[in-house]
Amino acid sequence: MATEITWLGHGCWSIVTGGHRILLDPFLNDSPTAPIKADQAEADYILISHGHFDHVADAVSIAKRTDATVVAVFEICEWLGKQGIEKTEPMNTGGGIELPFGHVKMTPAHHSSVLPDGTYAGNPVGYLLTIEGRRIYFACDTALFLDMRLIGAAGLDLAVLPIGDRYTMGPDDAIEATKLLQPKRVAPAHYNTWPPIAQDAKAWADRTRAHTAAEPVVLEPGESITL
Ligand SMILES: [Zn+2]
């Protein structure tokens, strides 16, 4: 069964596999690059990496409309409960759970995390998904860290890394991360949403091809990778 992974701009991704629809970090209505609006998004599960507005902005409205279950750290699930979202899967860094579409593991991320209303949001995370035997790593918002070597140790079919710099790792550190993770394919995210995180993804891709064994895949918002 093929898994289709679509970039919805910034840190937002849609994953469709075996009839399951998963949405990561829904930020659509206020995103200058999102190809759809929140009321067009479909989801059975919503994964959230941390509490910043550019990752949770549309989570509550989409969860309410679609009745999706939201996966997030414990503290964000508590906050979602207060917004009227009852279907959550609270987790924390290092933990994994089995869901109908596959296995979800929360990985560390070096960033900060607070919800839009100032509520403490626990630690930021990334996600390692195992779907139909394929392993997909979303680093989400993070700096480079050496333990990425452990995340990639069992083999990755795809790694999604931020390249925007300023708030997350930039292109240079994304290339170092690719060396540690050793994925078959690597896709950039969290760039070109606004001028402060503008990057030349083609230049990053050329350098990734020259310095790593991974195949870089640069998408436009709305485009997909099929695994
Ligand atoms: Zn962000």
Image (cartoon, grey):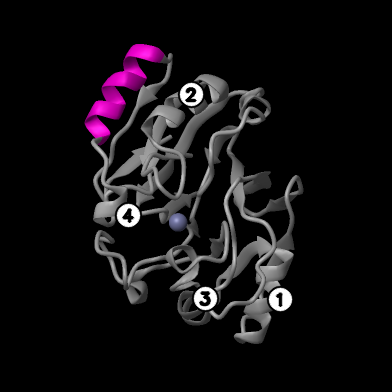
Frontmost of labels 1 and 2 is 2
Q: Is residue 178 left or right of residue 99?
A: left
Main SS, magenta region, reads: helix
Q: Report, in whole angstroms, how far the alpha carbon at label 1 lies from the one at label 2.
A: 36 Å
Q: Report, in whole angstroms, how far the alpha carbon at label 2 lies from the one at label 4.
A: 23 Å
Amino acid bearing label 4: Gly
Magenta segment includes 206: yes
Look at the numbered disc 2 and give the secondary structure of its residue. helix
**Does mark 1's beta carbon lie closer than 8 Å to ligand 1?**
no
Q: Is residue 106 left or right of residue 17?
A: right
Q: Which mark is residue 176?
A: 2
Frontmost of labels 2 and 4 is 2
Q: Quadrant of ligand 1?
A: bottom left
Amino acid bearing label 2: Glu
Q: Report, in whole angstroms, how far the alpha carbon at label 1 lies from the one at label 4.
A: 27 Å
Look at the numbered disc 4 and give the secondary structure of its residue. loop
Mark 3 / mark 4, whichever is N-terminal = 4
x, y percent for residue 94: 75, 45
Q: Which mark is residue 78?
A: 1
Mark 1 / mark 2, whichever is N-terminal = 1
Mark 1 / mark 4, whichever is N-terminal = 4
**Residue 195, placed above or below residue 168:** below
**Residue 141, placed above or below residue 226:** below
* Magenta highlight range: 201-211
Q: Which mark is residue 9?
A: 4
Amino acid bearing label 3: Pro
Amino acid bearing label 1: Glu
Frontmost of labels 3 and 4 is 3
Mark 2 / mark 4, whichever is N-terminal = 4
